[in-house]
Image (tube, rainbow, N blue to C red):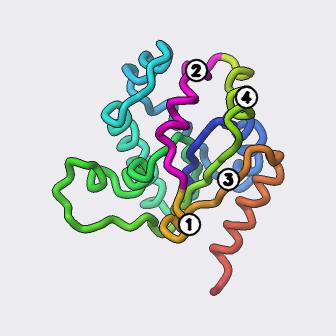
Amino acid sequence: MLSKWCRYQQDDLHHHGSVRLWQLGWPLHEGDSFHPEENVAKMARGEPLTDQDRYPWLLRLHDVIERERRSSSDALVACSALKRLYRLILLHGSKALPTSTSSTPLPHSVPGVFFLFLHGEYEVIRKRMVDRRGHFMKADLLASQFDVLELPVEGQEENVVRLDVSRNIPDMAMEVEKHLSSLKSPR
């Protein structure tokens, strides 16, 4: 099970990268299709989402991840999990919400789930967003995403594969396949 965030190259990844993932037989769950209508309308107006806006969406995606895990299936969930908290919600659901009464710290990884962190220069990503057509999220919102982005912390979020968006799609897909192979290799 994979989850990806920082989807700035998402259209390219879906077109090219998912071809390789589909060769693996993995379904693709596009995070944008799980947004409540209110979120879509807000982004279409150029308004950034708040944490409160994102929580129901992240919980829906957590349910998708859990469903795939319970069925022992591999899948790709494409979304913008910009903050550590968002990644924890994807992994642990409502137990990770700030309103949770759980006092036990949650692990930053869950067996069988890892994140692809697509990162790149602001202008490169902005240009790709400007060039895409038909998406409700406008490129003007990119700055708000960079403002809240929390980079994965080395040694704390071991379930992260970093991918530079300046690389070509086949190279990034090979990096993911290499990581998958390393997970299957005996240690």
- Give the structural element (helix, strand or loop) at label 3: loop
* Vertical position of residue 128 compared to residue 97: above or below: above
| Amino acid at pointer 1 | Glu
The answer to whether the residues at label 4 and label 1 have Cβ atoms under 8 Å apart is: no
Which class describes the residues within 10 Å of circle 1: few (<14), some (14-19), or many (20+)? few
The residue that mark 3 highlights is: 25
Q: Which residues are magenta?
A: 134-151
Numbered disc in front, either 3 or 1: 1
Q: Who's the residue at 66% across and 46% down the image?
A: 119
- Disc 4 is placed on an element classified as helix
- Among numbered discs 4 and 2, the one appearing first in the sequence: 4
Q: Provide residue 168's location: percent of width, then percent of height.
A: 83, 46
Residue where numbered disc 4 is placed: 128
In this rendering, which labeled residue sits more in front, label 4 or label 1?
A: 1
Tell me the kind of residue under disc 4: Arg
Residue 160 appears in which quarter of the rendering? Answer: bottom right
Which of the two discs, 3 and 2, sits closer to the camera? 2
Between discs 4 and 1, the one toward the N terminus: 4
Q: Residues within 10 Å of mark 2 (few under 14, many from 20)?
A: some
Say which mark, if any, is on residue 140: 2
Closer-to-camera residue (92/101): 101
- Element assignment for label 1: loop
Picture disc at residue 154: 1
Q: CA distance from mark 3 to mark 2?
A: 35 Å
In the rendered image, which quarter contains the C terminus? bottom right
**Which of marks 4 and 3 precedes in the sequence?**
3
Residue 147: in magenta span: yes
- Which of disc 2 and disc 3 is earlier in sequence? 3
Q: Which quadrant of the figure contains the N terminus?
A: bottom right
Looking at the rendered image, the disc whose residue lies closer to the viewer, 4 or 2, is: 2
